[in-house]
């Protein structure tokens, strides 16, 4: 039974859009091989460089570059540089001398490591190196003292340096589809963090300090190996979206009922055999997904909540809803659920 309605404002956010894009890219696969020659010429590069001298912004996206043009390293006042969809395998250390940079976008390349000298980019606010070949990060990354967004999705990262927890201004941490079995114990030090994307890793557990992220609004943990959630997750009173789908959870913390800001809870595709009655106490809950679990029934309090939600999914599970009840509407469905 899956009534569709307008999604909550959380689902219309930029964070939700990034999450959907990651899921779609993972589903369809990422085309990394360029079948057609680049449409850009040497003249296009020269034109972009000339414009950059006026605008302090240089974009060389999809130029199929193996090396960056020498002339760009003279643009000492450059604020924004983008070189996505190229053939770069290394980051030239001279790039780290462009210390005015606020935005650096190197997505969709073949970069295997970031230089330690990247620590010199202390004005950087956005670093996007998603869709590369990174396995780890330099410990010096903590010296990017103004960094607000760090995008590392679709790499091969197996471990994060503890120093990443020193990025005191970080708001967005995007790590979806890497190979992380854990995240640093001191993640709670990232006190301004608003969004964490960890979908598609190999997480076995969450550190207790995650409950200290007071400003966190979006937490995406689907497609991992989590067997339980720490009860401290309920401390995240500003959390609006919690996605723990496609894990191996056998239960949910009863403390979730105290999360006054939670709007969207997705616990589908787990191994839940029961859910706490306290889920009905989540005051602002609009979307609840419990499908594809091992639930023999639902607590009456949660059944009473269903008609008030904008969207819910409760099937398949280990109970059945007769067609006659479906055809009669939500009231009949709820009456049947209470009889199970």
Image (cartoon, rainbow, N blue to C red):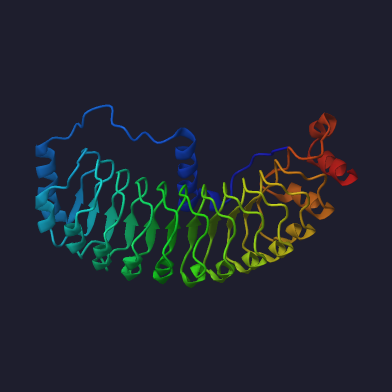
Which residue of the protein is positioned furthest toward the top in this rendering?
36
Q: Position of residue 163 (x, y in %)?
A: 40, 69
Left or right of residue 100, residue 296 in this image: right
Toward which corner of the image does residue 254 lie, by quadrant?
bottom right
Q: Position of residue 164 (x, y in %)?
A: 41, 66
The residue at the point 54 percent across, 51 percent down is 202
Toward which corner of the image does residue 242 lie, by quadrant?
bottom right
The residue at the point 13 percent across, 42 percent down is 45
Left or right of residue 184, residue 303 in this image: right
The residue at the point 19 percent across, 42 percent down is 66
Q: Nearer the viewer, residue 12 or 250?
A: 250
Toward which corner of the image does residue 54 lie, by quadrant?
bottom left
Q: Position of residue 40 (x, y in %)?
A: 17, 35
Q: Position of residue 288 (x, y in %)?
A: 67, 49
Q: Nearer the viewer, residue 264 or 317?
A: 317
Q: Quadrant of the C terminus?
A: top right
Left or right of residue 213, residue 296 in this image: right
Which residue of the protein is positioned furthest toward the right in this rendering?
339
326 to 291, vertically: above or below? above
Q: Quadrant of the N terminus?
A: top right
Instruction: Count the marks.
Output: 0
The residue at the point 71 percent across, 47 percent down is 271
Q: Nearer the viewer, residue 229 or 112?
A: 112
């Amino acid at each position: 039974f899956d009534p569709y309605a307008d999604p909550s404002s959380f689902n219309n956010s930029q964070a939700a859009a990034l999450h959907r894009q990651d899921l779609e890219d993972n589903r369809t696969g990422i085309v990394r091989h360029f079948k057609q020659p680049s449409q850009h010429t040497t003249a296009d590069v020269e034109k972009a460089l000339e414009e950059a001298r006026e605008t302090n912004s240089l974009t060389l996206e999809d130029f199929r570059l193996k090396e960056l043009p020498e002339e760009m390293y003279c643009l000492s006042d450059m604020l924004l540089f983008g070189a996505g969809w190229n053939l770069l395998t290394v980051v030239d250390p001279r790039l780290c001398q462009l210390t005015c940079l606020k935005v650096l976008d190197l997505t969709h390349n073949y970069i295997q490591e970031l230089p330690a000298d990247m620590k010199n980019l202390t004005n950087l606010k956005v670093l996007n190196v998603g869709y590369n070949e990174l396995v780890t990060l330099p410990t010096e990354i903590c010296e990017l003292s103004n960094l607000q967004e760090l995008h590392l999705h679709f790499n091969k990262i197996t471990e994060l340096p503890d120093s990443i927890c020193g990025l005191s201004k970080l708001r967005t941490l995007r790590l979806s589809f890497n190979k992380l079995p854990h995240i640093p114990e001191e993640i709670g030090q990232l006190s301004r963090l608003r969004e964490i994307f960890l979908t598609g890793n190999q997480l076995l557990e969450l550190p207790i300090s995650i409950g200290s992220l007071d400003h966190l609004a979006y937490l995406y943990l689907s497609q991992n190996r989590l067997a339980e959630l720490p009860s401290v997750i309920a401390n995240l009173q500003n959390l609006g979206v919690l996605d723990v789908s496609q894990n191996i959870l056998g239960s949910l913390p009863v403390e979730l009922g105290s999360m006054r800001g939670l709007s969207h809870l997705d616990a589908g595709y787990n191994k839940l055999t029961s859910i706490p009655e306290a889920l009905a106490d989540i005051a602002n809950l609009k979307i609840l997904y419990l499908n594809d679990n091992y639930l023999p029934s639902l607590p009456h309090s949660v059944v009473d909540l269903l008609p008030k939600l904008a969207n819910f999914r409760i099937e398949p599970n280990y109970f059945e809803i007769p067609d006659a009840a479906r055809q009669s509407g939500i009231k009949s469905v709820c009456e049947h659920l209470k009889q199970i």
